[in-house]
Every structure is written in structure tokens, then in C-alpha cells.
Amino acid sequence: MSQVQPFTTNALLDVSGDFPVLDQEVHGRPLVYLDSAASAQQPAAVIDTVAAYHRNDHANVHRGVHTLSERATEAYEGARDKIQAFINANSRREIVLTSGTTESINLVAQSYCRPQLKPGNKVLITQLEHHSNFVPWQLVCEQTGADLLIAPIDRRGQLDLERLQELMTEDVFLLAVGHVSNALGTVNPIQDIVGWAKQRDIKVLVDGAQGVPHMAIDVADIGCDFYAFSGHKMFGPTGTGVLYGREALLDDMPPWQGGGDMILEVRLDGTVFNDLPYKFEAGTPNISGVIGLGAAIDYLNAIGMDRIAAHEHVLLEYMMGKLSDVDGVRLIGTAESKTSVQSFMLGDIHPHDLGTILDHQGVAIRTGHHCAMPVMDFFEIPGTARASLAIYNSSDDVDRLIAAVEKARHIFA
Ligand code: 7TS
């Protein structure tokens, strides 16, 4: 008999009606979207804001005296202010707008680390990282002769915190660590980790791609030097992202890319760079996307990040319990502290086959290595099936997932 109790709670949100894309059938079944860790859906409020901008206000930013350019600039810079408040940064100068987490991390690797790293220096990461928080460090270590250290994980998919601290030696220049694992849902004790690094004068970048959509983020409280995240995982448009950086560090960093908008003056014999944060924003930015990201933040604030976290917590517990009740299911990632993501295997069925069968029942999950091959290597598997939750998911969605997995089990029996 199932050990999971029937679903009775009123802690849950009911906002799926805000997301037009969810109102459709896939293969003749109502869509159940459980792939928000890859990219979250957008509420009508975001879609409408972007459309209204294109209908009424579009022009380039920071360069026109005409009305449309002023409107576009105001909306774009207004979004920056919303982001600053949302993560409690000290100043809008600390909010660099990028194309996503990937670009934000590469910016730090190339502009902050590359000019300073020397042979013998170390960059410390963990085995839990997404490739975006892995490969940029491999590259910059190759470019500079620095060494890359990798902190190990345990069978539950948690960081080995003792080993991590041992690896924080004085020649470590920077620690780059995820807030939440995209493959396993592990929530790292980020404040503790940053605290240990600070005691040793190690700078810290936090990959917050999977943190920001699921919990209130306060960069002042976390105490990190850099925090990177993506708009499209927090119900905003694709091609938007943020690098929060401490002002004193950003000030000392050279520009990463050259072009329009990042300069104050260009002369034949040299260039004076723009102030923060524009020094890091060369070229015409993703104006409509950033304005849409501002609308996504309004949407999240209106619901409240604490309610979102509570909703997802209840739903994740329910999903983990139900999944582990299915014969032949093995959960991958059972950390004590988790959010919104569950990876699993069903017997020896290849995750891609499982994902295809689920899709035919209208259930969208992600399968494969989730851009976290080092995590898969640790568990000695090629990949997993991964169901990831967001504010618009319900216990019915979890029940549909379970029914679909049961069906797959019967097909392969
Ligand atoms: N870091 C983490 C922890 C992520 O989950 C992702 C994307 C990235 C960085 C890169 O973000 P991007 O917006 O720059 O691409 N994660 C996933 C995923 O889990 N499935 O598809 C993309």
C-alpha cells in the first residue's frame, strides 16, 4: 500500500490559469509541464508586457531624445531597479544585464579572473555544477595556468562540506558554486559556504539559476561577491539574465566586450569606458526581454516568494513520495535540503525512452545528463529522467506523472 497520504493541503497556489501555454493538449492529453528547470513558462502578464512594448514603445535605449527612446529607456532601466530590489543589491550599479547565467559566469571568468589568475592559483568548484559553472573555469584555468579544484559530492547528491572546506586553501582565488543543483535539486547551505570562504579571503560566485525562481534571494544576506541567474527560468523571456557583482569588484574589472553603449568617449588614441553597469553592456541589449523580466518580477512579488517556496516544498515532498512508491523507480538526488527537482530512473529503461512514453501521455519532463555530466559520472549513469516543478504545477500534475510512469513500467514489463 502507498505510504503517501492522499493529498490534502490548502498551502498550494492555483495560478496555472495565468499561463496561456499550459491550456493545451499534447498527443490528445492535457499538457502537464514538468520541465521548468530547463525553461519556465511565461504568465500572460509577461507576454502582454512584451507585446505592448513592441506595439507602442519600441526604440533603442540610452541614445535618443525622442519620446519612444525615452519610454524604452525608462522601462528598461525600470526593470533594472526591480531586479536590484528583488535580490536586495545595494545599488543599481551592481546589476549587469546579460543574456543569461552562462554569459554572467563567463563574464566573471574572463573579466575578473583572467587578468588576475597566475600559475599556481586555484579556482574551486564542485562536482554538482551545471556545465555553465564548469567549462568557463576550465577555460580560464587553461588560459592562465591556474589549477581547477573540484569538491566532491555524496550518494545523496550533497556537497561534502568538510572536503569543500579543506579545499579552501589560501591559494584559492575564487570559489564558484551553485545555489541549487539543476540535476538533483540539492539546495546548498550557501550562507555557510560563503562564510567559510570569506574567512579565508576567497571570492565567491554563486550560480543562482535554480535558486532565484524558487526562494527569496538576498545577496546582502548571502554575502557573495557575484550572483548569476537567468530570466527564462523565472518566468521571464529567454535571452535575459543578470550578473550581480559587488560594486568595488566590478569597478576594478576591465570591460569584457567592446562596442556601443559601454563607452563615454572614443578617440583615435583611446577610449574612456562608461560607468557601471554599462561598462559591461556593449551593444543594443535585449530591451523587450529585460522589460518582460521586470514584469516577471512584478508577478513573482505579487504572489510572494515565501508562498512560492511553500507551494513547491509541499509538492516536491508529494512527488518524491509518490515516485518512490512506484515499483522499480530509483530516486537520484535525495539530499536533506531540496527544492523543486526530482531525477529518477525506472529499472533499466533508458531515460530517453521513458521521456518519450511520458510525452505521448502529455507529460513533459527532461531526460539526459541535464548539462551536468560530472554528476551523472558520479552516479555512473548516462542520464536521468527529471521532473521539475514550478508555481503552476499541482498535485494533479504529479498524479498524472505517476500514472504515466506506471504505464511505462507496464509497457516495458
Ligand atoms: N546554471 C544552472 C544551475 C542551470 O540550471 C542552468 C540551466 C544554467 C546555469 C545555464 O543557464 P542559461 O540560462 O544560461 O542556459 N539549466 C538547464 C537545465 O537544467 N536544463 O536546461 C537548462
Image: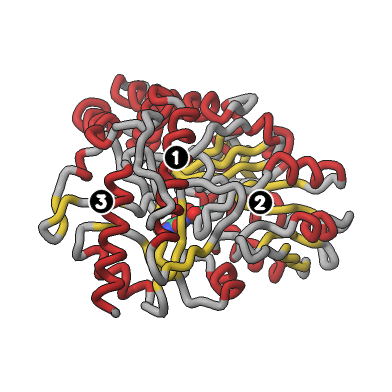
Give the number of the disc on residue 43: none
The number of callouts visible is 3
Image: 315 above or below 102:
above
Return the residue nearer the eye: 61 or 382: 382
User: Mark 1 highlights which residue?
Assistant: 314
Image: 67 above or below 382:
above
User: Mark 2 highlights which residue?
Assistant: 111
Mark earlier in primary sequence (3, 2): 3
Q: Disc 3 versus disc 1: distance between alpha carbons?
A: 18 Å
Name the spot of residue 332 as percent of width and height, x first: 51, 64
Task: Give the image quarter of residue 252.
Answer: top right
208 on left or right of 109 = left
User: Would you say residue 356 is visible in this rendering?
Assistant: yes
User: Mark 3 highlights which residue?
Assistant: 32
Residue at (60%, 38%) from the top-left corner?
244
Residue at (38%, 43%) from the top-left corner?
390
Q: Disc 1 versus disc 2: distance between alpha carbons?
A: 41 Å
Residue type marked 3: Val
104 on left or right of 195 = left
Task: Give the image quarter of residue 56.
Answer: top left
Q: Secondary structure at mark 1?
A: helix
Residue at (33%, 50%) from the top-left corner?
398
Name the spot of residue 347 as percent of width and height, x first: 41, 76
Name the spot of residue 193 as percent of width and height, x first: 74, 46
Tag 3: Cα neighbours inside 10 Å, few (<14), some, or many (≥20)?
Answer: many
Residue at (61%, 61%) from the top-left corner?
156
